[in-house]
Amino acid sequence: ETGVTQSPTHLIKTRGQQVTLRCSSQSGHNTVSWYQQALGQGPQFIFQYYREEENGRGNFPPRFSGLQFPNYSSELNVNALELDDSALYLCASSSYAGTGGWTEAFFGQGTRLTVV
Amino acid sequence: AQSVSQHNHHVILSEAASLELGCNYSYGGTVNLFWYVQYPGQHLQLLLKYFSGDPLVKGIKGFEAEFIKSKFSFNLRKPSVQWSDTAEYFCAAQYSGGYQKVTFGIGTKLQVIP
């Protein structure tokens, strides 16, 4: 177990709807990143939150947004769901180690989102 | 663009066979390298990592990887695989920068036949 927990584990939504996924980071970690893993692909970086602010983003549209809370837990929100958003969404936690570096990322089990 | 390439998408081996999975990463300055494993129905687990120092890195479950800077490679090896090694393996790279973005390869599905 990594100490990173995600909820829910599975979710089915209709195209056009909105979804919120949740993540509790490992104790002592102050950074949360979100990844999308489509079937047959490696995880793709969505964005990272550090000190409650987004400080890095991958190639995902603005309808993917997030929050990080003072206890370092996080949410991923996706608006106007599309069929291609069907994927496993992974949360990873880590800590800023100073001088531009981070500790290794620990991943949760993911939320399987199906858009129909 | 930063990228990670894995050479084999699907590997089938018999138990006790040796394993080598290829991984190449694109140049991007200082880079940390990882191999993750994903067993069926489970979360991504870190097998091993390279940040600096000895280029031969030993990980859990008898796995090791060698960082060859001149070839931009970080191949994963295990001398003798077991049925329980059946899983998907991901090579990943983290380039230095203002945030921690881990770039993953497409993954290699390893099937070990008893």
Image (cartoon, coloured by chain):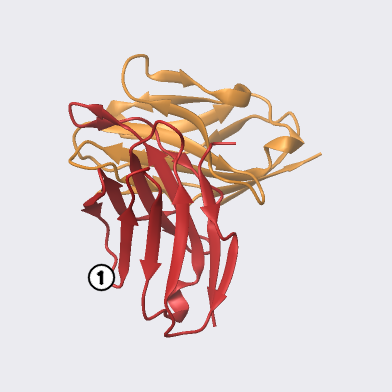
Please state if A28 lies on the left or on the right of B41 as rendered.
Answer: left
Q: What amino acid type should be assigned to the residue bearing mark 1? A: Pro
Q: Residues within 10 Å of mark 1 (few under 14, many from 20)?
A: few
Q: Is residue B32 visible?
A: yes
Q: Is residue B1 visible?
A: no
Tell which chain the image draws in orange.
B
Residue at the farthest front position: A70
Q: Total label count?
A: 1
Residue B76 position, x and y percent, is 50, 32
**Closer-to-camera residue (B69/A35):** A35
Q: Quadrant of the N terminus of chain A?
A: top right
What is the secondary structure assignment of the residue under circle 1?
loop
Residue A105 position, x and y percent, is 41, 37
Residue at the farthest right position: B114
**Which residue position holds label 1?**
A62
**Closer-to-camera residue (A116/A78):** A78
Tell which chain the image draws in red.
A
Q: Chain of mark 1?
A: A
Q: Going 42% across and 85% down the picture, which residue do you hit?
A: A16
Q: Going 36% across and 48% down the picture, which residue do you hit?
A: A33
Q: Quadrant of the C terminus of chain A?
A: bottom right
**Closer-to-camera residue (B60/B7):** B60
Please state if B90 lies on the left or on the right of B71 as rendered.
Answer: right
**Closer-to-camera residue (B96/B18):** B96
